[in-house]
Image: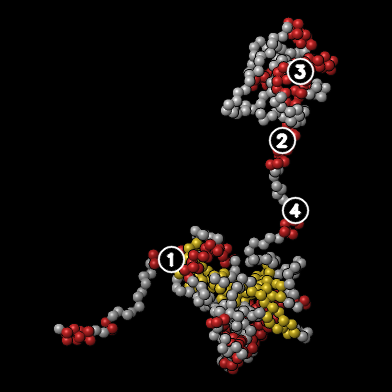
């Protein structure tokens, strides 16, 4: 039995297994294009000091977009963040370089087919300082930024005052290249100067080789401090194989039309001076001509290339097919929230603040104590200070029972308010005197305290029109008699003159 089992095991062969590649079905349910359209793909630049699980939890809080973005760990180094809104995604991209645990992250928007160099570079705002005075121009600043990477945005306005001693430039830098701190320039008129670069939001990097992918203790160039730097710089800028290589052969239509230094690799940037697509279009343009037109077309190619090389921006846009940099007058772009108090104080106030509560309360108090507008103060003023039209329009229904309407106070426990006694009836002689000297009408029955003020004042338009200044003087004694009555004396303790009703 054991021998048969051994023979069966020996007869097994891996060739029987189906190792052919599996074809993934091309169905819509197998794609996540709609979900990934609003997402970012990134990778850790230094996985030794960056934890993937902590990054998935910390980045939404750091972006202040909790519950609006979710992270997915794709590999040990790559991750994805899916946003609920496109404006949140754009806000994260506008913030520039992102860091986790003080080390950088390479983040780009998701694309279905990643291009070459995807997640191999980061966009950093760089401060360029010590620029020569005679070269403070947009083309010169752009060229100085091109020494360390591809310039995307230049924040420079030559028409405004500049308080900082630097110019901010947004540069796309490859993570495999060192971050240069300075660069020596040979000036056209003779002499040299050194410009300096400062990288915003870059917290940690290798202090030995100035790269973002490792710390100094793990730097591969630490043992070769002197010679390896020269080798690395030579490899990135100009290699021996490149110097001996010819780009235009004898059978090339461009041979003899363009020089080798016009189509070779630029040692400063490491990119071709003319893109392969542009060179192929030039070849097709020359091949499509006849013998008579060949010389004319060759001269056109030579002239157009020379004209494009005069302007660095045109050279990059037309020959190298690199998008030109964007120039902005916002000098603080990419810094986040910037508080500029001088700008706020110089601008005119377009939206004045509404009236404050304290000012409204004070104005309301003035209206309350105004002797002309306030009805409570008119009761304590002599008739001389009151307008004649108001006195003539007043007709009291009861002269001895004048009360001021106030808000009913809340009744406190254990206290009872004493009900004032009803005034005694007037004598017949007093009634006849008041009726003859004034326009008072004695009520036949007592009314409620709430209606004493508003119900007692009646307007007699016919009498008001016939009244004159002489009648006002005659009514002076009768009005003072009413003010000095018992009801007015009883209410005098409940209020302060010219201050409105009390809170009792």
Where 423 falls versus 269 (above or below)?
A: above
Label 1 Cα neighbours within 10 Å, binned few <14 / some 14-19 / many ≥20:
few
Residue at image position (76%, 57%) is 346
The CA distance from mark 2 to mark 1 is 66 Å
Tag in front: 2 or 3: 3
* Residue wearing tag 1: 32
Where 101 falls versus 192 (above or below)?
A: above
Circles 1 and 4 in contact, beta carbons < 8 Å: no
Residue at image position (74%, 13%) is 440
Tag in front: 1 or 4: 4
Q: Earlier in the sequence, mark 1 or mark 3?
A: 1
* Residue wearing tag 4: 348
What residue occupies the far left of the structure in this picture?
1
* Residue wearing tag 3: 484
Q: Secondary structure at mark 1?
A: loop
Horizontal and vertical percent for residue 198? 66, 75
Quadrant hosting residue 148: bottom right
Q: Earlier in the sequence, mark 2 or mark 1?
A: 1
Horizontal and vertical percent for residue 350? 72, 51
Where 156 falls versus 255 (above or below)?
A: above
Q: Is residue 268 left or right of residue 367?
A: left
Q: Quadrant of the C terminus?
A: top right
What residue occupies the far top of the structure in this picture?
428
The CA distance from mark 1 to mark 3 is 92 Å
What residue occupies the far front of the structure in this picture?
414
Horizontal and vertical percent for residue 40? 51, 67
Q: Earlier in the sequence, mark 4 or mark 2?
A: 4
């Amino acid at each position: 039995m054991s021998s048969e089992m051994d023979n069966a095991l020996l007869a097994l062969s891996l060739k029987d297994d189906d190792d052919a590649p599996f074809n993934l079905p091309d169905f819509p349910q197998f794609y996540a294009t709609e979900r990934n359209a609003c997402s970012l793909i990134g990778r850790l630049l230094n996985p030794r000091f960056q934890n993937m699980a902590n990054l998935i939890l910390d980045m939404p809080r750091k972006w202040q977009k909790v519950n609006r973005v979710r992270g997915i760990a794709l590999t040990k180094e790559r991750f994805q963040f899916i946003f609920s809104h496109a404006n949140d995604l754009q806000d994260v991209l506008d913030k520039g370089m992102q860091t986790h645990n003080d080390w950088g992250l390479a983040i780009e928007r998701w694309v279905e087919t990643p291009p070459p160099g995807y997640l191999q570079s980061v966009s950093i705002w760089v401060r360029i300082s010590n620029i020569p005075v005679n070269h403070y121009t947009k083309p010169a600043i752009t060229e100085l930024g091109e020494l360390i990477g591809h310039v995307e945005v230049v924040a420079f306005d030559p028409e405004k005052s500049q308080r900082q001693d630097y110019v901010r430039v947004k540069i796309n830098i490859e993570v495999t290249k060192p971050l240069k701190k300075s660069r020596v320039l040979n000036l056209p008129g003779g002499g040299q100067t050194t410009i300096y670069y400062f990288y915003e939001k870059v917290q940690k990097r290798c202090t030995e080789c100035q790269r973002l992918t490792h710390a100094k203790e793990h730097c591969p160039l630490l043992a070769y401090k002197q010679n390896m730097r020269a080798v690395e710089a030579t490899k990135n800028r100009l290699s021996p194989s490149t110097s001996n290589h010819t780009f235009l052969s004898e059978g090339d239509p461009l041979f003899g039309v363009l020089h080798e230094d016009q189509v070779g690799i630029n040692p400063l940037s490491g990119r071709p001076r003319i893109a392969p697509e542009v060179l192929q279009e030039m070849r097709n343009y020359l091949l499509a001509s006849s013998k008579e037109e060949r010389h004319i077309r060759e001269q056109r190619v030579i002239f157009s290339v020379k004209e494009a090389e005069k302007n660095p921006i045109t050279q990059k846009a037309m020959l190298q097919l690199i998008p030109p940099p964007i120039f902005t007058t916002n000098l603080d772009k990419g810094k986040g929230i910037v508080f500029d108090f001088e700008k706020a104080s110089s601008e005119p106030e377009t939206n004045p603040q509404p009236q404050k509560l304290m000012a409204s309360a004070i104005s309301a108090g003035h209206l309350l104590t105004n002797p002309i507008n306030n009805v409570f103060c008119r009761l304590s003023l002599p008739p001389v200070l009151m307008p004649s039209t108001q006195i003539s329009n007043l007709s009291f229904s009861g002269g001895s029972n004048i009360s001021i309407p106030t808000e009913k106070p809340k009744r406190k426990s254990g206290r009872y308010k004493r009900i004032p006694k009803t005034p005694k009836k007037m004598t017949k002689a007093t009634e006849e005197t008041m009726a003859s000297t004034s326009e008072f009408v004695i009520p036949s029955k007592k009314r409620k305290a709430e209606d004493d003020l508003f119900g007692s004042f009646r307007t007699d338009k016919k009498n008001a029109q016939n009244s004159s200044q002489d009648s006002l003087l005659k009514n002076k004694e009768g009005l003072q008699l009413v003010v000095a009555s018992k009801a007015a004396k009883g209410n005098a303790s409940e209020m302060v003159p010219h201050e409105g009703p009390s809170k009792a």
